[in-house]
Structure formats: structure tokens, C-alpha cells
């Protein structure tokens, strides 16, 4: 009997459905961003509720984007991996623009640090997706500040998303290590979206290779702000 779960048509149907859902969620997210930007009075009664709606829609959109990217990686191995030289400063600008309204609606400051002249070879869309998800995740833990920093450390580009919250739990730190060590088999997807996010980030990191070296992710506590630190390293 044919295994229906491995049917290419089923994979294509699921991917198309996820794509349609992502487009719908993006419309809702864009509408909320416009409303919040046009009415920046945080004291207004519906403002906090709208800010929370925007946060939740961005989380959902993150998950859908990750599913599509993983489908292209796993379901369609021949899908082109678009690595090009990118100015680090322009990459940061895109991430900041993408997160600006949500952070402002939550009253969270975003600090940035990067060498504007630095150029690195990477898949721009995938890396923006990873960093955007890391910032959205940091919103859950931070008190009021998130820091996005990029720097060359040795022969690697190190990207850090840090917050000034209470830090990651031991379970989350272990999940970060499992994502790199065991791929999807080492990540627990049953608790929340963190498992998918870590798996997505680890896969994107591993896709970036240079001279037999691959990228990697890590979770730590401490850093510049004393809270949780998400780290993405690319060769």
C-alpha cells in the first residue's frame, strides 16, 4: 500500500496552503502596523490590545515562513540557496524596519551595533527571517531593551540578539544545543513554537558553508544586557 504521507502532491498542497495562510496573516499584520503607526498614543484604550495582536500575528507569520523555508529545504532539495555578498549595515536596516512598529508598540528599545563597511556572503531572506524571529522571541523575555549586534569574530560573522530579561531557562538552553547536535530529532516541538524556530535557525546556519566549515547557532545567558542571548555564526 502506498505511503500517502510521502506523496509529492501532498507536500505541494500543504506548502500552497501554508503560503496562502502566510499571505493572509501578512495582510492582517500590515493593517495592524498601519493602525498602530497612525495612532501612537499608547494610553488609548485599544492600543495595548492591538499591540498584542500584532505580536501574535508576527509570531504566526514567523512560523509559516519557517515552514515554507523548511519545505523548500527538505521537500524540494533542489531549491536554490541564494548566497550573495551583502552589506551588514543594509541587513540591519531591513531587520530594524521590519520590527520597528512592533517594538514601539511594546515600548521596547532596540539597540544596534555593527561595522557598516563589513560585507558577508549569505542568503539575505533566510538570515532576515532568523534574526526577525529571534527579536520577536526576545520580546517575550525582555524588560524593555533588545540589542542586535553583528561583528566579525575571527573568520566568522557573529550575530547576536540579546535582551535584558531574566535569561533562558535550562530547558531552552538545552533545546538550543539539541537543535545543532541532533537537528529535528533533538528538538521538542510539542511545547511551543520555540522548537520550530530553533530547528529553522539551525538549518539555515548549517546551509551556510565555506571551506568545509558550516554555520551554527547557540543560546546563552549574560551578554551585553545580562539576559538571554541568541547567537548565529556564519563562516
Image (cartoon, rainbow, N blue to C red):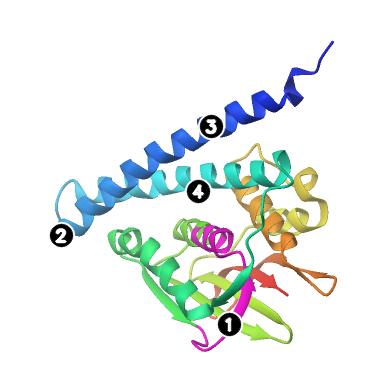
Position of residue 180 relative to residue 16, above or below, is below
Q: Given this view, does label 4 or label 1 mark the residue nearer the observer?
A: 1
For mark 2, what is the residue? 41
Q: Which residues are the magenta region?
A: 114-132
Q: Which of marks 2 and 4 is nearer the N terminus?
A: 2
Quick one: label 3 or label 2, which is nearer the N terminus? 3
Q: Mark 1 points at which residue?
A: 119
The CA span between labels 4 and 3 is 16 Å
Residue placed furthest toward the top:
1
Residue 106's quadrant in the figure? bottom left
SS category of the residue bearing label 2: loop
How far across and down, in percent of the image, does residue 131 sit?
A: 53, 63
Q: Mark 4 points at which residue?
A: 62
The answer to whether marks 1 and 2 mark residues whose Cβ atoms lie closer than 8 Å is: no
Q: Name the residue under label 3.
A: 16
Judge whether residue 110 is colored magenta: no
In three-dimensional space, the C-alpha distance between marks 1 and 2, rounded to whole angstroms, equals: 39 Å
Q: Evaluate whether residue 170 shows in this view.
A: no
Q: Which of marks 1 and 3 is nearer the N terminus?
A: 3
Q: Nearer the viewer, mark 1 or mark 2?
A: 1
Between residues 185 and 42, which one lies in front from this camera angle? 185
Q: Give the spatial CA distance, label 1 vs label 3.
A: 35 Å
| Rendered position, 80 above or below 127 | above
How busy is the neighbourhood of tag 1: few (under 14 within 10 Å), some, or many (20 plus)?
Answer: some
Amino acid at each position: 500500500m502506498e505511503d500517502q504521507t510521502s506523496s509529492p502532491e501532498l507536500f505541494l498542497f500543504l506548502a500552497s496552503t501554508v503560503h496562502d495562510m502566510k499571505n493572509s496573516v501578512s495582510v492582517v499584520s500590515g493593517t495592524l502596523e498601519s493602525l498602530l503607526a497612525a495612532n501612537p498614543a499608547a494610553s488609548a484604550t485599544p492600543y495595548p490590545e492591538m499591540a498584542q495582536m500584532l505580536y501574535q500575528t508576527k509570531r504566526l507569520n514567523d512560523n509559516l515562513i519557517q515552514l515554507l523555508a523548511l519545505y523548500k529545504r527538505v521537500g524540494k532539495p533542489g531549491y536554490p540557496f541564494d548566497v550573495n555578498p551583502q552589506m551588514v549595515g543594509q541587513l540591519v536596516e531591513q531587520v530594524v524596519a521590519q520590527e520597528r512598529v512592533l517594538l514601539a508598540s511594546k515600548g521596547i528599545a532596540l539597540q544596534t551595533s555593527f561595522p557598516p563597511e563589513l560585507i558577508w556572503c549569505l542568503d539575505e531572506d533566510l538570515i532576515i527571517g532568523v534574526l526577525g524571529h529571534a527579536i520577536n522571541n526576545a520580546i517575550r523575555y525582555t524588560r524593555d531593551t533588545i540589542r542586535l549586534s553583528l561583528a566579525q569574530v575571527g573568520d566568522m560573522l557573529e550575530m547576536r540578539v540579546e535582551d535584558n530579561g531574566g535569561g533562558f531557562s535550562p530547558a531552552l538552553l538545552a533545546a538550543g544545543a539539541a537543535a545543532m547536535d541532533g537537528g529535528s530529532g533533538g528538538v521538542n516541538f510539542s511545547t511551543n513554537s520555540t522548537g520550530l524556530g530553533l530547528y529553522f535557525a539551525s538549518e539555515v546556519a548549517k546551509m551556510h558553508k565555506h571551506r568545509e566549515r558550516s554555520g551554527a547557532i547557540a543560546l546563552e545567558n549574560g551578554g551585553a544586557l545580562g539576559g538571554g542571548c541568541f547567537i548565529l555564526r556564519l563562516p
